[in-house]
Image (cartoon, grey):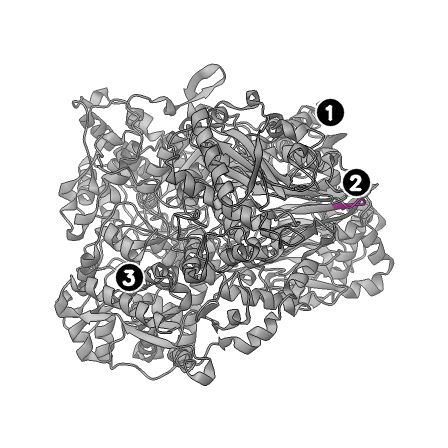
């Protein structure tokens, strides 16, 4: 291959949990503590539940081997009775996976026996676990270990053990961690498929049976599990969905203590901090060799470093393990160090306790979290944790509640906790006394001795009351709240400018970023993506921060929402020495607590004052990071050594706060010295202190002139800073405020009039909001967890740099060493720029500027060259002379001008990773006539997902028509499409005009404006049943290149009446989509959405859009296993209509990395033939496409360049709605200036295809598909590397050599169907399995088929339903929508279901389809509901109170656009998110009710969680409040709250409740209606400004058209007459 590397490829280097293996699952437990040994029924119930969650798991590459399933139970003493005795009734039992080879196995057994004997454990014997290997899949069978149990009696010397055998458990724990050490010492480690030696459990309380099997196979494989003597009081069960297809048995869960559904987003930081914590322990006072004595073993786990002595104990944490395994290890140690299990979980995964209404009467719980938050960083990320230490069992949900968790309690004391309800098939509803769910941060616990069940408050209050945390905090903690800013300047004007220059400031940084942040308190919004060179290729000096790309969440874990769900987030930080988490004491509260990580001068002074004896003795030490300029580039190494040495020395001498400062006292010092970039300094000090065991003893403050962007602050904190004092940024704010221009703008009203103090406050506010955004896109809630977590990828930094300051960070192509960094830092100095010191340089990093400005690939000059090539004149439009010109003013395409356009890109400065590559063919060139035609190549072309709204109608429709003409795939983007675009044009006249699209030119009969790909994004804008069934491919937008981890954004001025009508929103109101987390927050939930889409449109493939980042390969594997048909890898440089500037510049990686990694991971895992790979992001030429194909892409997306081809002039004002050529404006007068026609775009595509043909001929290839995956045809270009001095350290081969060689095996280009027949992948679509069988039965029902076909009549049908029946009604809705569109169905179909419905019950139902469920349902009920009716009621024999019990799950009615919904019970979290038309009544809800709502009405007859109405811009909510606590639960940022004050409002609510009673028989509704005059006073009305003048809010409005229902039985709308009273006829019609 052309990419030859002496070292192994680094493509998948990095933490295992990031680059190799990610997982999610279904999890739960069953507990009944009656009887000494429990019962076999507990186990059989757990196994039945496990089987019913099979769809939440995944299968290996062979389609049979499971990703993992298992159970943890009490040790089944009846079954293992032969190993018990009177003297040892409960021995220690080990469950171990051993090699299949007998000699190896015996050698490992000898290790086990010897270590046990050495530690005085009397070895009682071995038992081979009876298994049936015939039930295993091929891959699982190839890897299956030999599975044994071993038994030990407790040491005789352990006579002083306590009643619950904690001493014995500690000994077993330490001995287990010793096994691996001795095994390695004896050389018994094998790197092959028979090297497994893994202890699944070793305890006298619990045992784990698990394997790489499907749920139903587990009890068939392990014969013990079907033995009636296997009795237990509890069972934790777990079904795993892994992104990897190569099974490894130890990765199955439960782990030793925990079953984990989720992902730890802060893993790298957590592991680093645990290492720091362990190394801080003093082993001089430890006796590490005595595991037996009660006090000794207690001392080891409490006070000894058990991480850094691999010669004695296996390390506690290791990035080579999964996130679940690391969390389990820390939890296990905390439990062994006398934390109770629920206490350990509370500390590790804390709730969002600040201002929580639920905790206002429980200060002890708040104090617990405050205390532990100071000494332990949260293991942050989406998590449902089920845990047991053998003494208690429980479950806990992360602070965001982004995992489903339901529970039921029966009258015999059994507790069933599960990811989905309905997983216990034979559970009698009449025996259930309570049904509930875990909300965000909540937990439940069952004491396995007493049998007592405790709910969230009860167990937390009990745990929190064990120590006086509140008193400790009051006595010991120092709080630094935000203080006033200084108004005096630090330096004179010239010195300020000199300093700014040396720190890398440019004019843009002040004119754009500082102006926006100081002036408006917001980060700069910008557009068009990042088309500047990656920093490693730039010839301009770049701050070190620019070499780091922020990582973000996609698929396996969700981003969170800093705008609407900020209640769960915090930027608070601490300074000072952190005490042990294993020994809780008052000293743990002795910390300085910072309200904000951004400190000003006064706050720095306050910190300094705490060094005094009377103020707490928090000793400070300031260390300068400046060094002499005369030392040259090599001086940076010595300076860095000196800084690190000084840090170590100061901490050893008692300093608890280190201040790393690059501040110079005056101009003279600036002239003579330079500085270590603060990011380099803080990273080096952080890692050095960890190494020395001192990091927990001190906090680090960075005092720097080189931090002004949100990205800068994120980098500094991410690499170890606890706080930042940005003195030069604050100085620059003062400078900006004093400018004449700024003062004049304030005087004229163009800028808000603010003081210099307010400007600095605004700057801090903007930085804080930006930090929250950066945290949230990775799914992290707490800055304390982000600190030191290193959640970045480096692009262009060498090994020396990474090892010194950024250890553990991925840098795939190497790059700059320390001296290079020193040189680049010096290049920023004024004297290096050869410029007189008058003003800063405008580097043009954001907006192109001539001369000194940075190169931008997309420019006005480039647009001009392309326009000349394709025959476009930007002056020709409807606003000018188009009608008078021949061929609508489209000039002939010019090959010569395209060559000029192409040449301009070839000789341009280096910009992209691919610019460092060249072609190297393996054969002779051929004549171009032998190459396949351009028409075949163009079928692989797509447009990027640019929404109608971001683009004008003219631009959006022109692109769609052009791509459809060439046989490619156009993309709707998020926002929906007009149904008028669904049919081909037949009314085009000889001038190319159509009355259907009068605003377009250059049309032809047969043209179609219907986008091939219809996109489903997190905002669900425009997603209706008709939109879904008219797409030929449905794309799930998981992330966007310009702003991965964030939702879409459409500024209010661009939301015209037309755009608002398509998006079911309010005209002129800014639309911000939620981050992609509501129903795509994990791999199994993405699989569910894919299932939903395959259900409603079986003919359409489903594509999933990802963004390039480290680990995208393993994510892509999960997406392929989730039954996607296409995977799109977008580059981080993709375009956008509007995005925060820091997101455009600093999030997402080049597509070359992501594409190569995804293709390679899919190949390595045997999944490449399941999916088509598509790529986009900055693709402009045929050369780009050839490179992408060789890296594995089969289809190619054009974004910005396609817009240029229809007239875009790169004005970069998309976000302002002022596009001068109407491409991205919704203003009528600007849209008339749109110059493009489909022919222009077709000309461009044709040129690109011909360029590709020329390349193919040169390379000697006639078929394009023969280039795909052929990375051996690429090589590193030394000639290109030599163009930029600092690229000398870049080394491409090590990464790209990881692309598998596919020269001989090309089978991945075809899909295999039954019989092994190979077909084109594009010809087949994945089809849902048995989970859609019920839906298929509905669609085949003769009466139903007839009603749909005739479009009249009525039919009824009844069905049983279980939790594995998913997306029920989606297929039927698709059939109706295909036949009649969204609202054309005139028949009536009434369906009744009985049982526990699976996920997405009633998805996409539409008018005329009425659905009733008797039983309960899981998440996403009514997802995308467009009309009709959904009613959910409990079983008639239910023994619980309906209004107090959960009946449906989370995110119900997500994206609903119409219909009526009634639930006789409580709903979960995020009810009616993005509802834009449904009328819904339920009897209680969790957090975030009505979030992002834009229409419809919600009536809630019971209590709700917090954050009601966040982001709500339309619609109305009614909330019953009989406890007087509702107001504190409302997010008042947008909505207003008042009592019902209008006749229309009262009538609307009353009629909805009456309808609810008639539909459900609700006792709660009956109580309210029976005492209406009193009860109506307990309702609050919640509404946004857009509804303030509606009749239900204002008496002044016309009440004649007040709706009380989304639709009547005949599909017409229901209205209320003037005065609010309905006639008997109306009542019958609307409340039927």
Task: Judge left or right: residue 1018 versus residue 622.
Answer: right
The residue that disc 3 covers is: 680
In the rendered structure, which disc, 1 or 2, sits on the residue that comes first in sequence? 2
- Main SS of the magenta part reads loop
Q: Magenta part of the protein: which range? A: 409-413
Q: Nearer the viewer, mark 1 or mark 2?
A: 2
Quadrant in which residue 1574 is drawn: bottom right
Residue 1128 part of the magenta segment: no
The residue that disc 2 covers is: 429
Q: Nearer the viewer, mark 3 or mark 1?
A: 3
Q: Residue at x 79, y 63 (%)?
A: 1576
Instruction: Note whether 1111 is above or below 334 in the view shown.
Output: above
The residue that disc 1 covers is: 1343
Relative depth, front residue between 1385 and 453: 453
Task: Judge left or right: residue 1621 versus residue 146.
Answer: right
Q: Secondary structure at mark 1?
A: helix
Q: Residue at x 45, y 49 (%)?
A: 553
Relative depth, front residue between 262 and 1011: 262
Quadrant in which residue 420 is drawn: top right
Q: Position of residue 1038 (x, y in %)?
A: 47, 44
Marks 2/3: CA–CA distance: 62 Å
Quadrant in which residue 1438 is drawn: top right
Q: Residues within 10 Å of mark 3 (few under 14, many from 20)?
A: many
Q: Are marks 1 and 2 in contact (CB under 8 Å)?
A: no
Q: Position of residue 606 (x, y in %)?
A: 42, 81
């Amino acid at each position: 291959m052309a990419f030859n590397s002496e070292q192994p490829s680094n493509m998948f280097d990095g933490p295992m949990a990031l680059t190799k293996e990610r997982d999610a699952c279904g999890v739960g437990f069953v507990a009944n503590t009656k009887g000494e040994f429990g019962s076999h029924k507990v186990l059989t119930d757990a196994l039945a539940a496990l089987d019913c969650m099979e769809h939440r798991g995944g299968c290996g590459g062979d389609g049979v081997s499971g990703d993992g399933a298992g159970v943890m139970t009490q040790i089944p003493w009846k079954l293992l009775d032969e190993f018990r005795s009177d003297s040892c009734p409960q021995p220690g039992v080990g469950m171990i996976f051993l090699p299949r080879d007998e000699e190896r196995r015996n050698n490992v057994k000898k290790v086990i026996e010897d270590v046990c004997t050495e530690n005085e454990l009397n070895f009682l014997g071995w038992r081979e676990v009876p298994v049936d290997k015939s039930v295993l899949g091929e891959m699982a069978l190839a890897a299956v270990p030999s599975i044994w149990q071993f038994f030990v009696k407790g040491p005789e010397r352990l006579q002083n053990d306590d009643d619950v055998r904690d001493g014995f458990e500690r000994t077993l724990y330490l001995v287990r961690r010793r096994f691996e050490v001795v095994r390695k010492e004896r050389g018994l480690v094998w790197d092959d498929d028979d090297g497994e030696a893994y202890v699944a459990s070793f305890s006298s309380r619990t045992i784990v049976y698990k394997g790489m099997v499907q749920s139903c196979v587990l009890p068939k494989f392990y014969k013990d599990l079907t033995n009636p003597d296997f009795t237990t009081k509890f069972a934790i069960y777990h079904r795993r969905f892994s992104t990897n297809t190569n099974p490894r048995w130890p990765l199955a869960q439960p782990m030793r203590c925990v079953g984990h559904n989720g992902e730890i987003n802060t893993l790298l930081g957590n592991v680093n901090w645990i290492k720091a914590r362990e190394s801080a322990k003093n082993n001089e006072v430890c006796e590490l060799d005595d595991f037996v004595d009660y006090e000794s073993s207690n001392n080891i786990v409490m006070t000894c470093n058990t991480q850094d002595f691999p010669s004695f104990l296996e390390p506690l944490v290791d990035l080579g393990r999964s996130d679940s395994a690391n969390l389990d290890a820390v939890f296990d140690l905390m439990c062994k160090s006398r934390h109770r299990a629920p206490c350990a979980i509370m500390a590790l995964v804390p709730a969002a306790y600040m201002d929580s209404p639920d905790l206002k009467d429980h200060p002890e719980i708040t104090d617990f979290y405050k205390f532990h938050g100071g000494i332990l960083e949260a293991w942050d990320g989406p998590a449902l944790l089920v845990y047991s230490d053998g003494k208690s069992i429980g479950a806990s949900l992360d602070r965001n509640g982004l995992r489903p968790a339901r529970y039921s309690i029966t009258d015999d004391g059994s507790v069933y906790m599960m990811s989905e309800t309905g997983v216990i098939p034979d559970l009698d509803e009449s025996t259930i006394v309570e049904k509930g769910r875990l909300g965000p941060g909540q937990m439940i616990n069952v004491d396995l001795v007493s049998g007592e069940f405790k709910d969230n408050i009860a167990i937390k209050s009990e745990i929190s009351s064990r120590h006086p945390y509140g008193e400790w905090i009051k006595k010991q903690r120092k709080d630094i709240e935000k203080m006033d800013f200084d108004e005096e300047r630090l330096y004179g004007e010239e010195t300020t400018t000199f300093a700014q220059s040396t720190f890398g400031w440019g004019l843009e940084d002040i004119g754009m970023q500082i102006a926006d942040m100081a002036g408006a308190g917001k980060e700069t919004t910008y557009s068009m993506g990042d088309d500047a060179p990656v920093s490693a290729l730039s010839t301009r000096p770049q701050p070190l921060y620019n070499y780091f790309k922020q990582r973000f969440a996609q698929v396996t874990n969700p981003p969170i929402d800093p705008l609407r769900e900020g209640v769960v987030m915090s930027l608070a930080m601490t300074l000072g020495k952190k005490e042990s988490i294993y020994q809780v004491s008052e000293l743990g509260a002795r910390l300085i607590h910072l309200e904000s990580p951004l400190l000003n001068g006064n706050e720095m002074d306050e910190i300094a004052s705490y060094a005094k004896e009377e103020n707490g003795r928090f000793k400070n030490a300031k260390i300068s990071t400046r060094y002499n300029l005369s030392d040259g580039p090599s001086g940076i190494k010595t300076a860095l050594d000196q800084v690190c040495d000084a840090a170590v020395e100061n901490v050893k001498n008692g300093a608890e706060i280190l201040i790393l400062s690059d501040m110079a006292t005056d101009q003279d010092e600036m002239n003579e010295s330079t500085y270590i970039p603060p990011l380099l300094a803080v990273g080096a000090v952080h890692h050095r202190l960890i190494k020395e065991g001192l990091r927990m003893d001190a906090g680090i403050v960075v005092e720097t002139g080189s931090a002004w962007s949100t990205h800068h602050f994120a980098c500094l904190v991410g690499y170890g800073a606890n706080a930042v004092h940005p003195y030069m940024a604050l100085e620059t704010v003062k400078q900006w405020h004093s400018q004449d221009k700024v003062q004049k703008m304030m005087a004229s009203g163009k800028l808000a009039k603010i003081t210099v103090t307010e400007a600095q406050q605004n700057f801090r506010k903007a930085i804080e909001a930006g930090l929250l955004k950066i945290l949230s896109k990775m799914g992290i809630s707490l800055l304390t967890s982000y600190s030191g977590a290193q959640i970045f990828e480096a692009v262009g930094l060498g090994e020396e740099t990474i090892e010194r300051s950024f250890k553990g960070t991925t840098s795939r192509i190497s790059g700059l060493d320390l001296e290079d960094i020193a040189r680049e830092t010096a290049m920023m100095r004024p004297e290096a720029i050869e410029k007189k010191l008058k003003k800063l340089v405008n580097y043009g990093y954001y907006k192109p500027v001539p001369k000194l400005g940075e190169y931008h690939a997309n420019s006005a000059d480039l647009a001009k060259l392309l326009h000349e090539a394709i025959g476009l004149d930007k002056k020709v439009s409807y606003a000018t002379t188009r009608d008078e010109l021949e061929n609508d003013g489209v000039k002939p395409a010019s090959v010569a001008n395209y060559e000029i356009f192409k040449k301009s890109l070839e000789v341009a400065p280096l910009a992209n990773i691919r610019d460092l590559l060249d072609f190297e063919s393996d054969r002779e060139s051929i004549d171009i006539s032998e190459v396949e035609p351009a028409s075949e190549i163009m079928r692989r072309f797509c447009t990027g997902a640019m929404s109608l709204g971001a683009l004008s109608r003219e631009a959006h429709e022109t692109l769609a028509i052009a791509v459809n003409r060439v046989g490619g795939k156009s993309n709707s983007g998020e926002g929906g499409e007009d149904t008028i675009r669904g049919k081909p044009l037949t009314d085009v006249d000889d001038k190319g005009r159509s009355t259907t699209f009068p605003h377009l030119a250059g049309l032809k009969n047969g043209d179609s404006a219907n986008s091939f790909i219809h996109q489903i994004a997190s905002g669900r804008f425009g997603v209706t049943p008709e939109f879904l069934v008219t797409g030929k491919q449905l794309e799930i937008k998981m992330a966007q290149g310009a702003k991965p981890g964030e939702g879409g954004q459409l500024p209010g001025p661009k939301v015209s009446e037309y755009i608002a009508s398509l998006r079911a929103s309010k005209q002129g109101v800014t639309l911000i989509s939620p981050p992609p987390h509501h129903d795509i927050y994990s791999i199994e939930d993405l699989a569910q959405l894919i299932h939903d889409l395959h259900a409603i449109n079986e003919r359409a493939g489903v594509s999933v859009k990802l963004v390039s980042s480290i680990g995208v390969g393993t994510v892509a594997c999960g997406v392929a296993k989730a039954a996607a048909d296409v995977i799109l890898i977008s580059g981080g440089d993709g375009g956008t209509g509007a995005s925060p500037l820091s997101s455009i510049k600093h999030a997402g990686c080049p597509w070359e990395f992501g594409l190569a990694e995804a293709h390679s991971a899919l190949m390595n895992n045997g999944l490449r033939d399941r999916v088509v790979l598509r790529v986009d992001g900055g693709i402009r030429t045929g050369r780009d496409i050839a490179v992408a194909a060789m890296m594995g892409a089969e289809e190619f997306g054009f974004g910005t360049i396609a817009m240029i081809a229809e007239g875009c002039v790169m004005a970069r004002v998309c976000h302002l709605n002022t596009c001068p050529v109407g491409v991205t404006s919704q203003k009528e007068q600007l849209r008339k200036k749109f110059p493009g026609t489909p022919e222009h775009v077709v000309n461009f595509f044709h040129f690109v295809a011909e360029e590709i043909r020329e390349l193919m001929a040169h390379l000697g290839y006639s078929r394009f598909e023969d280039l795909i995956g052929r990375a051996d045809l690429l090589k590193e270009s030394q000639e290109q590397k030599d163009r930029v001095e600092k690229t000398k350290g870049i080394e491409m081969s090590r990464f790209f050599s990881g692309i598998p060689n596919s020269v001989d095996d090309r089978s991945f280009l075809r899909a295999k169907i039954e019989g092994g027949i190979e077909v084109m992948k594009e010809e087949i679509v994945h089809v849902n399995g048995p989970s859609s069988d019920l839906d298929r039965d509905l669609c085949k029902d003769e009466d139903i088929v007839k009603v749909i076909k005739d479009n009249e009549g009525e039919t009824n049908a009844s069905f049983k339903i279980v939790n594995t029946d998913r997306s029920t009604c989606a297929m039927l809705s698709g059939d109706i929508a295909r036949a009649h569109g969204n609202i054309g169905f005139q028949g009536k179909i009434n369906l009744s279901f009985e049982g526990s419905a699976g996920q997405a019950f009633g998805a996409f139902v539409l008018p005329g389809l009425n659905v009733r469920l008797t039983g309960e349902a899981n998440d996403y009920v009514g997802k995308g509901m467009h009309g009709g009716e959904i009613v959910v009621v409990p079983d008639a024999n239910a023994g619980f109170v309906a209004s107090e019990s959960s009946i449906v799950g989370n995110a119900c009615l997500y994206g609903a656009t119409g219909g009526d919904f009634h639930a006789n019970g409580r709903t979960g979290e995020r009810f009616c998110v993005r509802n834009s038309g449904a009328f819904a009544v339920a009897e209680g809800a969790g957090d975030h009710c009505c979030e992002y709502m834009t229409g419809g009405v919600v009536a809630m007859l019971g209590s709700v969680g917090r954050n009601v109405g966040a982001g709500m811009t339309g619609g109305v909510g009614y909330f019953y409040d009989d406890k007087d606590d509702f107001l504190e639960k409302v997010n008042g940022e947008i909505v207003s709250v008042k009592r019902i004050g209008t006749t229309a409002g009262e009538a609307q609510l009353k009629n909805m409740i009456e309808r609810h009673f008639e539909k459900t028989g609700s006792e709660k509704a009956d109580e309210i209606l029976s005492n209406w005059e009193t009860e109506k006073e307990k309702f609050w009305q919640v509404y946004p400004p857009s509804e303030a003048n509606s009749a239900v809010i204002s008496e002044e409005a016309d009440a004649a058209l007040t709706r009380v229902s989304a639709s009547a039985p005949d599909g017409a709308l229901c209205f209320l007459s003037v005065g609010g009273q309905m006639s008997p006829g109306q009542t019958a019609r609307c409340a039927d």
